[in-house]
Image: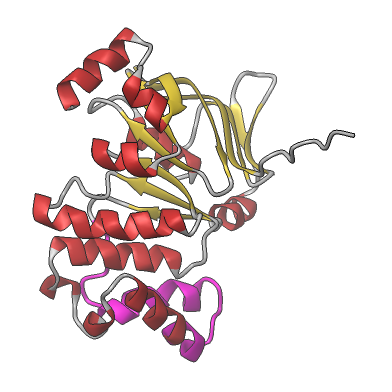
Amino acid sequence: MTTETPQPRIMIAAHGLGKAFGTNRVLQGVSLDLAHGEVVAVIGPSGSGKSTFLRCLNHLETIDEGSVTIDGEPLATAGQDGRSHYVPEREVRRICRKMGMVFQSFNLFPHMTVLQNLIEAPMTVKGLAREAAVAKAEALLDKVGLLAKRDSYPGRLSGGQKQRVAIARALAMEPQIMLFDEPTSALDPELTGEVLRTMRALAQERMTMLVVTHEMGFAREVANRVVFMDQGQLIEQAPAAQFFATPQHPRTQAFLQQML
């Protein structure tokens, strides 16, 4: 008697995403599924729609066409009129809390200490008591190697330290999925490593992660799967080792020749 392999839990299901800014179509029929515990790296040239794709997944931008489902819950559905229709705003906010996002520009509150940056959202959005929020924040700062900076202001931190605080702040909301938008692109090379080490540790803990990155080494070593985007389209995707060893599409091949 054969036993069926259990189907993976799909955390993000994006199908046929279309997005335009005026006459500029930045996403054209982009589809991607992200399974629980999977790390997917999204690579491609500047202006290929990678960041817009990420922002559409957590409703920082709205899609024009297609559907997005987060952990089995529809965020936007494709209507018979060809347009995307979102669930009510309250549901949008609740569903999007399943995702944490880390931006390339840190986005920390400069007038708050590191600790205050971490406890603000859990207290105001989730209603967590201050004592519990502080304990969680201190544990996360310890995890990213920055507990000693708990009372510092962001202006006194290096870029790499700011980005690790930003990761800890996103984790403080206990997301099921982490989205990273070029998290090291604003950093000097020597500071990039400390951020990538933090992300590697998350991957080892089986955090579900979708990472837009230009760090080919990280994509090769850490990602389960690599996706290549160009001109608003998803051109190719494959397991990381296969993607870098035998890219199939000419545009992928040309891009990797430039980058590697």
Residue farthest toward the bottom in the current orientation of the protein: 131
Q: In the image, 100: left or right of 5?
A: left
Find residue 229 and report its image quarter. top left
The foreground one among 110 and 185 is 185
Q: Picture coordinates of residue 253 (x, y %)?
A: 27, 14
One can see residue 27 in this view = yes
Residue farthest toward the front in the current orientation of the protein: 1
Q: What stretch is highlighted in magenta?
A: 106-134
Find residue 120 and report its image quarter. bottom left
Q: Which residue is drawn at 66% across and 41% down?
A: 8
Query: Quarter holding the N terminus?
Result: top right
Asked which colour scheme the image uses, the reply is secondary structure
Q: Residue at x 36, y 48 (%)?
A: 180
Is 109 magenta? The answer is yes
Task: Tell me: residue 24, above or below residue 200.
Answer: above
Q: Picture coordinates of residue 88 (x, y %)?
A: 65, 48
Find residue 60 and report its image quarter. top left
Q: Picture coordinates of residue 81 (x, y %)?
A: 65, 19
The foreground one among 106 and 254 is 254
Q: Residue at x 19, y 18 (%)?
A: 257
Q: In the image, 135: left or right of 185?
A: right
Residue farthest toward the right in the current orientation of the protein: 1
One can see residue 61 in this view = no
